[in-house]
Image: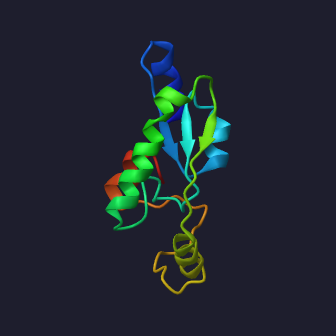
Amino acid sequence: MCLIARHFESLGLPTLILGSALDIMGAGKPPRARFVNYPLGFESGRFRDKTNQLAVVREALKGFADITSPGIVPLDFEWQAGWDMLNEREKGKLDNRSPRTTEPQYQTEDDRRAAGGQ
């Protein structure tokens, strides 16, 4: 997203990234970004909390006026229950996904062939 944002900015179109992966955003050097310290997947607010979601997005959009030079500006929101949920999932209590591997995985045989897999 950072590369796309930089391209659009070079064409004169203002962009704003709202993200929760500070290390990834930092590596991408976005022209204008807001960081919310929520677990991945919850960048636009707490799960099923419309009030918080609206507050996060409204505050983030202020970045169009407030961020005058390239950078990442943190938002002042906290959600400890979200991090607790993530920690529980990582302990295997809520996570039913297959373990990660370095081997490519495909949903169908056609997908494997299309990707050039053997």
Rendered view: 95 above or below 112: below
From the viewer's perspective, tell me whether residue 78 is left or right of residue 108.
right
**What residue occupies the far top of the structure in this picture?**
11
Q: Where is residue 78 in the image (x, y as percent from the top left)?
A: 56, 62
- Which residue is found at the position 47% from the left and 29% from the top? 64
- Residue 10 x %, y %: 51, 14
Q: Nearer the viewer, residue 28 or 42?
A: 42
- Residue at 46% across / 59% down in the picture? 41
62 above or below 110?
above
Q: Which residue is drawn at 36% across and 52% down?
A: 54
Residue 45 drawn above or below residue 98: above
Labels in figure, total? 0
Residue 100, quarter of picture: bottom right
| Viewer-closest of 28 and 104 | 28
Q: Is residue 70 visible?
A: yes
Quarter of the image holding residue 51? bottom left
Q: Where is residue 47 in the image (x, y as percent from the top left)?
A: 39, 67
Q: Can residue 108 be seen in this view?
A: no
Q: Which colour scheme is used?
A: rainbow
Residue at (45% x, 20% y) in the render? 8
